[in-house]
Image (tube, rainbow, N blue to C red):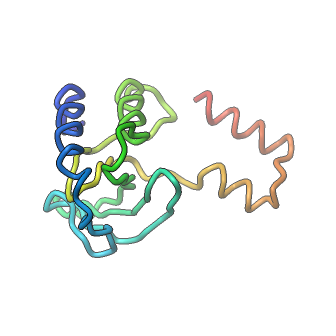
């Protein structure tokens, strides 16, 4: 179940962005931090130009494991906001992560979603930068489920 609706999410992000655009004291999120008095950041999984991905534990649900994508509220256009909107539209489709919770806190937009396996970049690197036909076909089957 998604904890916020799309309309209020967009409004909240815009108003918080205005607040944080001039705030240079935004502290980076780290292992041990707690989001919304509920989700404990337990491990950093990855990082890129989009922001960071953490493994979080849901303290209100027997420490269930989730992935949390985080993006600093610095830019007018947010990739994470767009991703959230797309995932909301696709929430009933198989093969896409399910959003548990999303919002803003401490100068960041975050999205807590289903923990998935390796991403395509990790698979590509593990295979030495070459995907054989069998791997491509397995990936295509997964994308079409």
- Above or below: residue 118 compared with residue 29: above
Q: Nearer the viewer, residue 27 or 4?
A: 27
**Residue at the extreme left of the image, as rendered:** 37
**Residue at the extreme front of the image, as rendered:** 22
Residue in view at x 24 percent, y 28 percent: 6
Residue 54: x %, y % from top left: 40, 62
Residue in view at x 69 percent, y 55 percent: 123
Viewer can see residue 1 = no
Residue in view at x 20 percent, y 25 percent: 7
Residue 53: x %, y % from top left: 43, 58
| The C terminus lies in quadrant | top right
* Quadrant of res 99: top left
| The N terminus lies in quadrant | top left
In the picture, measured across the screen, residue 140 lies left or right of residue 40, that is right
Residue 128: x %, y % from top left: 82, 61
- Above or below: residue 2 compared with residue 34: above
Viewer can see residue 109 = yes
Total numbered badges shown on the rendered structure = 0
Residue 84: x %, y % from top left: 36, 36
Q: Nearer the viewer, residue 110 or 42?
A: 110
Q: Nearer the viewer, residue 101 or 107?
A: 107
In the picture, measured across the screen, residue 107 lies left or right of residue 133, that is left
């Amino acid at each position: 179940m998604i904890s916020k609706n799309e309309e209020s999410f967009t409004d909240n992000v815009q108003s918080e962005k205005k607040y944080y655009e001039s705030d240079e004291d935004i502290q980076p999120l780290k292992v041990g931090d707690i989001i919304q008095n509920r989700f404990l950041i337990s491990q950093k999984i990855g990082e890129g130009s989009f922001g960071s991905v953490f493994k979080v534990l849901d303290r209100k649900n027997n420490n269930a494991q989730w992935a949390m994508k985080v993006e600093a509220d610095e830019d007018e256009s947010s990739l994470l906001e767009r991703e959230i909107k797309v995932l909301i539209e696709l929430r009933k489709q198989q093969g896409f992560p399910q959003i548990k919770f999303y919002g803003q806190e401490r100068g960041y937009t975050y999205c807590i979603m289903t923990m998935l396996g390796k991403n395509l970049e990790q698979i590509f690197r593990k295979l030495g930068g070459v995907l054989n036909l069998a791997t491509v076909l397995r990936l295509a089957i997964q994308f079409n489920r």
